[in-house]
Image (tube, rainbow, N blue to C red):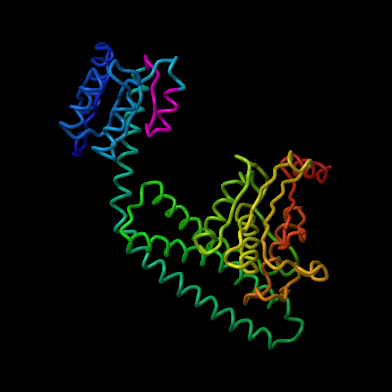
Amino acid sequence: MGGHVTPNVLVVDDEPSITTTMAAVLEQEGYAVHTAASVAEGRVAIRARPVDLLLTDLRLDDGTGLDLLSELRGANPDAVTVILTGYASLDSAVEALRGGAYDYLIKPCPVDELKATVAHALERRSISLSLKQRLTELDTTNTNLQTFAIELTQRVDQLTGELRQKIHELSEASRAREEFIGMAAHELRTPLTSLLGWGQYLQHNLQRGSQLDEEGLGRISRRVEQQVQKMSQLVSRMLETTQIENGMLAIDIASVDLVPLVHDAVESEQIRVPGHQITVHAPATLEALVDPLRFDQIVTNLVDNALKYSPDDCVIEVELRDPVETEAQVVELVVRDHGPGIPLGAQSKVFERFHRVDTDQNRAGLGLGLYVVRRLVEAHGGTIMVETPEDGGARFVVRIPGIAGAQAAARERAS
C-alpha cells in the first residue's frame, strides 16, 4: 500500500459464500478485511476496531444494512458504506444512497466492479480527510483573502476615481473612454464584493467554532475559485476597450444550464447582503446558449439593483421560466423587488448610462448596472423590460432565445 495505513474493510452478509469470496478478493487488493454474518455481529466488529469501509447486504436476518450504516456513522463519521442488494431491492438501494451510503452493488457483482467501487469509496474518504486537514490552512488563507479583497477594492475605487477625474477634464470627444472606465470598475466590484462576502462567512464560522463538512468546505472553495476566475476574465476583457466603445461586446457562447448559474449568483448576493431574503423559483434544469460569465453579470446586476432599492425586510424574487412556460422560443429571467417602484415617466430611461431613479432608497453608485445589463442582454440577442406590478415594486424581465430559437436564428443568418 505504498507505506500508507492499510484500510480496514468490514464485509457483512448472511450468505457465507458471498462473504468468503468478497473477503478473498479484497485481501488480494491489500485491504485488512473482517467479516460478519448479521447486524449483531457487524455491530460488535464496528465497536472492536476502526472501520474505514463497510460493505454490507441491505437485507439481513436480524435487521438491515442501514442499521449498520447508522452504527458506523456514530463510531467513525469519516467512514464510507457500500450497500449490497439484489435486483428486487434496487429501489431500497437508492433509498440507502439518500440515507448516506456512498454507492451500491447488485449481487452477484463482477470482481472488477467490486474492486473499482471499493477503491473509489476509499479514495472519496481520503479526499474528505484531506479537506478537513486543510481547514486550518483555510483560516490563514481566509484572513489573507479578506485583506486582499478589501485592499484591492479600495485600490480599484481609488484608481477609478482618479481616472474618472482625469478623463472628465478632457474634451467631450473623450467621453466614451470615461464611460468605459466606469463600466469596467463597476464589473470588477462584483467578484471582489463576493470574495469579501465568502471570506467573512468563513471567518464567522471559524470564530464560532463551527465545523464545516466536506460539502460546505468544497462549496466555499468553489465559490472563491469561481470569483477569482471571473476577476481574471473581466480584467482580460478590459483590453477590449475599442470594441466596447463601438458597441461591440465579445461574448463566449456555450450550452449552459442556467439553474445552477442563477443559484450561485443569488447565493453570493445573499451572503453579501444577509439582511434581505432572496428566493429563487426555477425548473430542475434549463439549458440555453449563453456566455456563463456575462449571464452571471446579468443576474448579479439585477439582484444588486433590486437590493439597492428595497427596504431590508423586503423579499427579492428571482424566477427562471423555460420556453414551455413562456409559450415562445425564449427563456425568461424575472427579478422582482418590493421597493418604491419606478415612475412611468422614468421607465424608458432606467437602462441609460448614469441614470438613477430618484427615490428615498437610492444608494450611491455610477448608475451603470442596468445599462450593463441591457448591453449584455442585447449581445445575447435578447430584450429586457421593466414592469410596475399593481402591488408595488419593480419587475425586470429578461428574454433571451432558447436553444431552439438561437439555433434557428443562426441558421437564418447563415442562409
Q: Specify the segment rendered in magenta.
A: 92-109
Q: Nearer the viewer, residue 40 or 78?
A: 40
x, y percentage for residue 244? 70, 66
Q: Farthest residue toward the left?
A: 48
Query: For residue 57, which quarter of the picture?
Result: top left
x, y percentage for residue 359? 70, 75
Residue at 45% across, 20% down:
90
Relative placement, left or right, of 368 versus 208 is: right
Q: Nearer the viewer, residue 4 or 274?
A: 274
x, y percentage for residue 358? 72, 76
Q: Considering the image in quadrants, where does the N terminus appear?
A: top left
Q: Nearer the viewer, residue 42 or 124?
A: 42
The relative height of residue 316 versus residue 177 in the rendered view (above or below) is above
Q: How many marks?
A: 0
Whether residue 104 appears in magenta in the rendering, the answer is yes
x, y percentage for residue 176? 73, 76
Q: Farthest residue toward the front?
A: 391
Q: Considering the image in quadrants, where does the C terminus appear?
A: top right
Residue at 57% across, 66% down:
312
Whether residue 220 appears in magenta in the rendering, the answer is no
